[in-house]
Amino acid sequence: MPNPIIRLATSTDCAAIATIYNKYLGIANMNLEPQTRAFYEAILKKQGDRERLFVMTLEAELIGWAIIKKYSDRLGYQYTAETSVYLDEDYIGQGLGTYFKKYVISVCKELQYKHLVAKIWASNETSIIYNKKLGYEEVGIQRKIGFVKGEWVDVIILQLILD
């Protein structure tokens, strides 16, 4: 398999980012309505200096995206970021998500974050295992925090402390 390329997202990537994200509506995220290209363009425009939106391409095809965003606007949380990685479902299970998340973690270190947070549906065992393999540890569960398709959803909170 050719090597994937990871780069900063541009506005021309936003439609593909939305397409990938929308495949996970109501099964791995709490959004119940599709996101648009314009939604991700707005994210790009309002990102702070320590926030990033990346894409992963393979042979010029956008196959995934990742985000590093501030955990909170409160100054006391200035060293905490939330991270997410989304891959097109055709590329899951090939080690690409791990490669991508390791890259995101390395950028978080460069941006001087010390604490990373990942919020994952408790039923999403694959994502939980994947994050734990990368050093994240489970620190709590938010029970019945979401209501999707007529059912309550629990979310697992994972953290990674960077040295």
Image: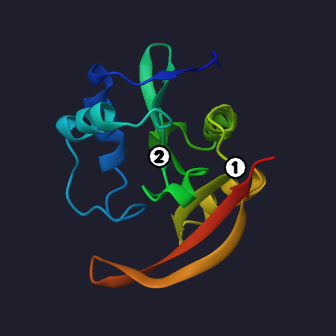
Nearest the viewer among 92 and 85 is 85
Q: Position of residue 96 (x, y in %)?
A: 62, 34
The residue that label 2 is drawn on is 69
Quadrant location of the N terminus in the rendered image = top right
The one nearer the camera, 150 or 14, is 14
Q: Which amino acid does the dot numbered 2 rest on?
A: Lys
Residue 99, image quadrant: top right
Residue 49: percent from the left, percent from the top?
46, 32
* Residue at position x 32%, y 32% in the image: 44
Numbered disc 1: secondary structure: loop
- Kind of residue indicated by mark 1: Lys
Vertical relation: 40 (above or below) 131: above
Q: Is mark 2 on a helix, strand or loop?
A: strand
- How far is mark 2 from mark 1, CA to CA? 13 Å
Q: Give the x, y percent position of residue 16.
A: 31, 31
Q: Which mark is residue 114?
A: 1
